[in-house]
Image (tube, coloured by chain):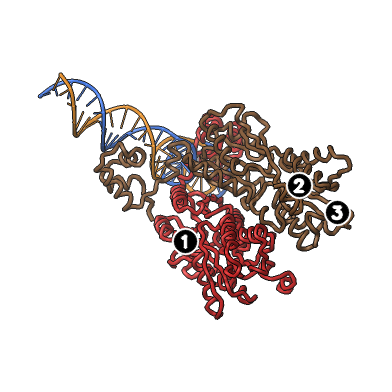
Chain colours: A brown, B red, C orange, D blue
Amino acid sequence: MARVGIREVASLAEVSLGTVSHYINHPDRVSPEKRQRIQKAIDDLGFVRNNAAWQLRLGRSATIAYIAPDVSNPFFATIAEGVERRAAAGGLKVFIANSNSSREREDSYLEMFEAQGVQGMLVASHEPVEDRLTQIRLRGTPSVLMGQRAASPAQPSVSLDEMKGGFLAVRHLIDIGRTRVAYVGGPLSVPQVGERYEGALAAVRESPGVTIEQIDAVDRTIAEGRDVADQIAARPVEERPDAIFAVNDLMALGLLQTLVVEHGIRVPQDIAIVGYDDTVFGASSIIPLTTVRGPHDSFGPTAVDLLTAEIAGEGSEESKHVVFDPELVIRASTVTPAASSMAE
Amino acid sequence: MARVGIREVASLAEVSLGTVSHYINHPDRVSPEKRQRIQKAIDDLGFVRNNAAWQLRLGRSATIAYIAPDVSNPFFATIAEGVERRAAAGGLKVFIANSNSSREREDSYLEMFEAQGVQGMLVASHEPVEDRLTQIRLRGTPSVLMGQRAASPAQPSVSLDEMKGGFLAVRHLIDIGRTRVAYVGGPLSVPQVGERYEGALAAVRESPGVTIEQIDAVDRTIAEGRDVADQIAARPVEERPDAIFAVNDLMALGLLQTLVVEHGIRVPQDIAIVGYDDTVFGASSIIPLTTVRGPHDSFGPTAVDLLTAEIAGEGSEESKHVVFDPELVIRASTVTPAASSMAE
DNA sequence: CGGCTTCTTTGAAACGTATCAAAGAAGCGC
DNA sequence: GCGCTTCTTTGATACGTTTCAAAGAAGCCG
């Protein structure tokens, strides 16, 4: 169980400690004969390089961190996948951490990764995290904010035009003739939630006679979507909305399931539903979900690129903020199949 | 940008380097006056403890690793959540890594976490990974194998009785009168896939007149489920199975979606479908999915408990292997709503 | 007041690695 | 054969922290 180090390897291979280190890092600079002896010693002893010492010596490790608010939301899982791929191509390892939308845990991970000496961090957050990122950046660890446009020009970010997304969603609902829209999601203080709402409001304002109400939420999960559905179903029919814009697909799915299965409400005839994120499960839900889609596949890789540029110190002022355009994906939860096939 | 260390803090606070360290680790052993001076210096300088050096000195860090084959499968994401919760309660941080079902990447992460000096690892894998875990364990890093029962008594594991799961699924299909079952999933060399198939076979053997075919798969994703659906729909009606047991919910959802929406096949009337894992999206799919459920909520925490016992060196031989019992959750993809309500 | 214990503070040593400067070996051309 | 260059090898040093042994300060009791 005694931890084996470079020193043991050296003595077994009968070479100096420095030679072993050279073999590991610049194999070409060591004679073929010793190369073999050393490799054998490494295998025999089961030597594994101690990362702590390695990092301490080098100052940094070839890893980056990705902090997601909720790994069980497929949206973030998909992004993680893209991050992984691009990072692997650049020889970087990725540590994923799940803050579970808890500010406390988010802080704790930020701190730990900084102390850990990662090269940089990708931070998707529902919190106003930018100030902390600035602190950390000034201390030498760069980061990319994901999902919110950073306020500071110095803080790189990758985001979606959320206002436009909200606008597209509600505009579509109005286009198909709905007039009583409910925006399901909260708290509005979460940047993404607030901006989507603003976009929704903009669409409503353009159209006289259309009203919007906001139904609050805390976690934005499937379960919460179900709760809201019960709440809506409990209202007298004439007080129910005829359209719902859910802040994300998870809530939309919960709503959909409960409205349709439990309460026999017809979607889209009685209530049309639009989600957000274009999660992979939206397409195969009870009633395929109309949703707002960002470029999932570009999100992760773009963030990694921004981060590596930042690490290399070559991030140019103009290119630090990437804002993607959302698009609307129309499915059966807002239009009946016949009309849907026209739309596609 | 110059990295600030304990030394700078000490000189700014006009105390010795050792005192600062004491303040950080045993605040009670330093006089109140200096305590204040040191804290101020830390704040002014924005000192963050260098984890590499810390770990190097201590030998180990208070972290564990969770390696999952596919984070975007909600099944693993849910487990990750449970792992996180239990670990946080024990003061442990969790690094999540995504091997993407690639043996190469799995190896690379195993190696990196070992070098990283984590206290232990939770490994969910579709590969025969046990030998490598044994190696790593002998070198001093314990682990818990998740999702497969370990062959060695010394290797802790948390798993589901997969054979029973397969049996339950197919038994149910037979009970509702189906005779031509297709098992969709592969490769059979993946332990979980093979065992579920064995269970399915056992159920078929009990029932004369019932046949089963296996339709192979590689990744077991939604997309692959869709492909298989196209393949099945392309057959003459009489050669189609009247029941499908999919190796996981992801494939089942892909199948469901494509069979129903694209090909107009009725589920469960024409083909009944059973999934596996009881993913949160199964309940809200096009047609709510009958599925085999393991105790999601216990899985992660149990694994963490096993691991901490192992770390503490107090794992008892008998308790190292936890095997959970699966149960069948019946929904609309195998029985019509009327019958379903009876079942619930 | 002297000796004892307890509380603070100190500086040095160690953790395992990469790298640097320097020494040694070997090969080459003249 | 000599001096030069190039290729290998070596051992010492530093990375930033914790901890240990020891010294100093302070308080207490007889």
- Report which quarter residue B210 is drawn in: bottom right
Q: Is residue B301 visible?
A: no
The answer to whether marks 1 and 2 mark residues whose Cβ atoms lie closer than 8 Å is no
x, y percent for residue B190: 48, 62
What residue is pinned by disc 2?
A186
A237 horizontally vs A151: left or right: right
On the rendered image, what quadrant is the N terminus of chain B found in? top right
- Mark 1 vs mark 3: give the one in front: 3
Spatial distance from mark 1 to mark 2, Cα to Cα? 46 Å
Q: Secondary structure at mark 1?
A: loop
Q: Amino acid at mark 1?
A: Gly
Circles 3 and 2 on the same subunit: yes
Q: Amino acid at mark 2?
A: Gly
What residue is pinned by disc 3?
A240
x, y percent for residue A70: 64, 50
Spatial distance from mark 1 to mark 3, Cα to Cα? 60 Å
Residue at 67% of width from left, 48% of height from top? Answer: A278
Q: Nearer the viewer, residue A129 or C12?
A: A129
What residue is pinned by disc 1?
B313
- Mark 3 vs mark 2: give the one in front: 3
